[in-house]
Amino acid sequence: MNAPHNFHSGSNPETHTLAPRYGQILLHWDAPEHEPLELGPKARLVVTTLLIIIIAWALYTNSPLMAITFILVGMTGYLALSHEPRTLLFYITSRGIVAGKEFYEFEDIESFHLYDEPPFDNLLSIKTNGNLVSHVHIPITTLPVRELYDTLVQFVPEDKHEPGLVDTLEKLLHI
């Protein structure tokens, strides 16, 4: 799988073109890279208190590595909450699927599934033959799901993908 290059960017997805090796654009849409997570003041207080207790426990039990780890977890969480998710562009082309900067050729995609029930509604799941990441989830926001289905089924077989533990955690943690 190769990452696409040579995007000609503009402010509108209709003005974008891809390098010829990715094929002709059949469908396109944009969506945030993940759902934003909104924590209220009580939730922030609970999370901060838990982190302080865990870090204090780590220092009390003479576990500096654990303390450093949870300090970094807290900093990472704070940074993740403080910025808005980027908007990514998605394309279905005659040769594959472009998701942000990643390109998945149809020959590397084993199957796809369109989730339509909460909490996984409006989500395209593609199963690839990749060793590290076997399933890729792509949000569908501005595109009719039926149009996406009709286009994808021409190139890739549909197969129901049952959400696993990692998928559920991803959805709950908004990552």
Image (cartoon, rainbow, N blue to C red):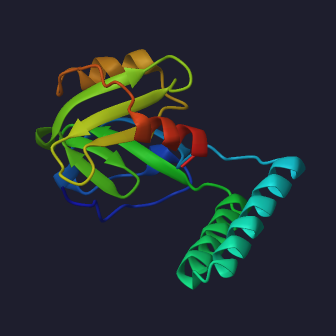
**Residue 148 seen anywhere in this rendered image of the structure:** no
In the drawing, does residue 129 fall left or right of residue 90?
A: left
Viewer-closest of 85 and 82: 82
Residue drawn at 56 percent across, 20 percent down: 118
Q: Residue at x 18, y 22 (%)?
A: 157
Camera-nearest residue between 131 and 23: 131
Count of residue discs:
0
Res. 5 image quadrant: bottom left
The image position of residue 26, as x and y in percent, is 31, 33
Q: Of all residues shown, which one is farthest toward the left?
A: 107
* Residue 52 visible in this rendered orientation of the protein: yes
> Residue 21 at x, y = what percent?
17, 54
**In the rendering, at what x and y percent does residue 172 appear?**
58, 39
Question: Which quadrant holds residue 25?
Answer: top left
> At which x and y percent is residue 32?
57, 46
Quarter of the figure with the N terminus: bottom left
Outermost front residue: 61
Location of residue 117 with respect to 101 vertically, above or below: above
Q: Identify the residue shown where x is 54% and y is 38%.
A: 171
- Tell me which residue sits at (64%, 75%) in the image: 58
